[in-house]
Image: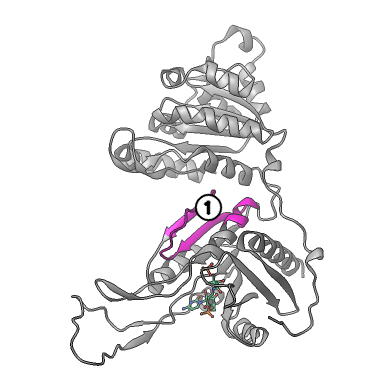
Amino acid sequence: MTWSGECKYTWAMVSQVSTHYRLRGRNILLGITAGVAAYKAAELARLLVKVGAQVQAVMTPSASEFIGPMTLQAVTGRPVRQALFDSQHEAAMGHIELARWADLVLIAPATADFLARLAAGMADDLLATLCLASEAPLAVAPAMNEKMWRHPATQANMATLAARGVMLWGPAEGEQACGDTGPGRMLEPAELLQRAVSAMGGGRFAGRRAVITAGPTREPLDPVRFLGNRSSGRMGYAIAGSLAREGAEVTLVSGPVALECPPGVERISVETAMEMHTAALTAAKSADLFVACAAVADYRPRGAADHKIKKGAETLQVDLVKNPDILRDVAALPDRPFCVGFAAETERLREHASGKLRDKGADMIAANPVGEGLGFESDDNALLVIWKEGSLELPRQRKGRLAEQLVSVIAERMDAQATA
Ligand code: PMT
């Protein structure tokens, strides 16, 4: 494979990406309330300690029905704090000291009751008091029965907390301890660790919102058949993960793929190009960055048949109509994000990529040559990244590593554009 044209930038000029070191030496106040998921708090504390954070566990009075303080003390190396009226600490206003000590307050699990008390501004136990007294960023990882989660009272409390700037991490959907299935599971400890890393800032995308499209779309022909393509979603998912590690708040609009959502990323699952268009446009309105990595069907059948199409005539004609162009429409938004498109090409990579940069109104195009084990479905890829004033070749490598490099290039171009 050869790429022609002048290359103004080299990879050595682009800085490396960092990850968990951001929590080293940071003070995390880990609040544990009385939910079944409290047992996972020990693993979360262990992960936080492992990456170098100092963790102070604070339990509500009934949390110890679900996990013993000794377990948390052993993992964190610090006595667990439970009582507000504790003569040992409160003589010196210990709760205020603790509130000042925290760089991040993370409540995991956060029960419906605790969230209600938090929303109401109560100070009826040590943990609730600390949340009021601390100026540190506050994150909650809700965990409760799905009906409790869906209850309008809980939803109203969550809206109040969100409006106050509390970070809402989860809940996840799935099977619950009570046997119900739905939203209400606490996010896994590894996911919460990743969110904490992102929240502690220092990443090049801290405070920025990113929306990524990934994977294929499926355009239904009838109830059992569709027009699709070979995109596995690997490239887009790797970019979403990289951006989250760099501190971005990431929304991944994904076509049907067999991949786990990267830690710290919110996924919206869609099937058709029209669904992807709606989800991406809605999310992109408040985004700083939009990356269109999905292989979106350019056309869809005019109308999907209501019933399975039967075999009959020797030939079958399918009438196709054009899908909207998601990248172009996002780039045309009034207060648009920085727009990065992809181009999968079998020939004249630079020429086609330049054409797409112009035609779609993008700020940058990452072009990948397809074939020879690159691009669709493979673990490897190579990119020619072009923008108006320059370009950069990122040679063949694993998509994970390539995504990190691409994210660095994007950060650099966004910063350059902002200061131009
Ligand atoms: O998913 P993997 O198996 O890891 O493979 C990754 C990939 C090869 C799919 C990815 O790296 C890639 O190149 N994605 C774009 C694929 C493509 O065919 O693009 P395109 O030339 O059709 O479209 C150009 C750009 O416009 C793309 O950013 C695309 O997302 C966007 N587009 C296209 C059509 C449309 N209706 N809406 C769009 O937003």
Give x and y (percent) for residue 377: 51, 68
Name the residue at 37% across, 39% down.
154
Q: With respect to residue 308, does 186 lie above or below?
A: above
The amino acid type of the residue labelled 1 equals Pro
Residue farthest toward the front in the current orientation of the protein: 372
- Kind of element beneath mark 1: loop
Residue 172 shows up from this direction: yes
Image quadrant occupied by the C terminus = bottom right
Is 63 left or right of 407, judged from the image as shown?
Answer: left
Residue farthest toward the top in the current orientation of the protein: 87
Front residue of 414/190: it is 190
Name the residue at 50% across, 66% down.
214
| Magenta highlight range | 241-268
Mark 1 surroundings within 10 Å by alpha-carbon count, few (fewer than 14), some (14 through 19), many (20 or more): many
Front residue of 123/105: it is 105
Image quadrant occupied by the N terminus = bottom right
Quadrant assignment, res 160:
top left
Name the residue at 55% across, 33% down.
44
Q: With respect to residue 320, does 208 lie above or below?
A: above
Q: Determine which residue is flagged by label 1.
A: 262
- Is residue 242 in the magenta section? yes
Give x and y (percent) for residue 294: 50, 70
Front residue of 339/151: it is 339
Q: With respect to residue 42, does 276 lie above or below?
A: below
The answer to whether the beta carbon of the residue marked 1 is less than 8 Å from any atom of ligand 1 is no
Residue 135 shows up from this direction: no
Quadrant assignment, res 352:
bottom right
